[in-house]
Image: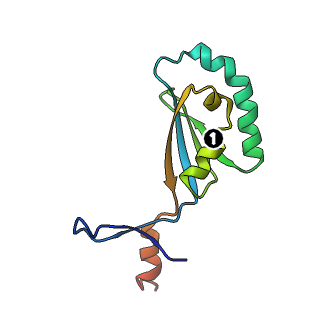
Amino acid sequence: MPQQTQSGAASGVPSIPTPKTTAVLVIETAKPGVTAQQIMAVIPAEIRATVKLYLDGKIQQWYSRGDGKGVIFLVNANTEDEARAIMEILPLAKEELLRHEYIPVGPLMPLRALMSSGTQQ
């Protein structure tokens, strides 16, 4: 499979290899004006739906943010659109109470340099 690259031709900067997307990091925070009570009213259904996605292999990991401002999911998806489709079925998303940030992630690219640089001893 060809390696993905970011185009730098227009700016004169060399192309930087980008990883194949193997998961999408999803950061959820409450929308401005949404109260804790609004969220807590939906939490039982949200938890059940999230556990189902985990058991179905769609959510790989999930965390509470250390600052208490939301949650972070690592979603098994190859594209942002695929992750968005998974997350939009959750009750808090259906109620439009959350903001979602989607960040595609993949293998650590500098490791490729180690594999191809002839540094084997």
Residue 76 is situated, as x and y percent measured from the top left of the image, at: 64, 53
User: Seen in the image, is 69 located left or right of residue 93?
Assistant: left
Residue 62 is situated, as x and y percent measured from the top left of the image, at: 62, 40
Q: Could you say which quadrant of the image residue 85 lies in? A: top right
Residue 96 is situated, as x and y percent measured from the top left of the image, at: 58, 27
Q: How is the image coloured?
A: rainbow
Number of residues whose C-alpha sits closer than 10 Å to that of mark 1, classed few (under 14), some (14–19) or many (20 or more)? many
Give above or below for 85 relative to 116: above
User: Seen in the image, is 13 located left or right of residue 105?
Assistant: left
Q: Which residue is mark 1?
A: 87
Looking at the rendered image, the quarter that the N terminus falls into is bottom right
**Image mark count:** 1
Between 10 and 102, the residue placed more toward the observer is 10
Q: Could you say which quadrant of the image residue 48 lies in? A: top right
Residue shown at the point (77%, 45%) measured from the top left: 55
Give above or below for 38 relative to 109: above
Disc 1 marks a residue whose amino acid type is Met
Residue shown at the point (46%, 84%) measured from the top left: 120
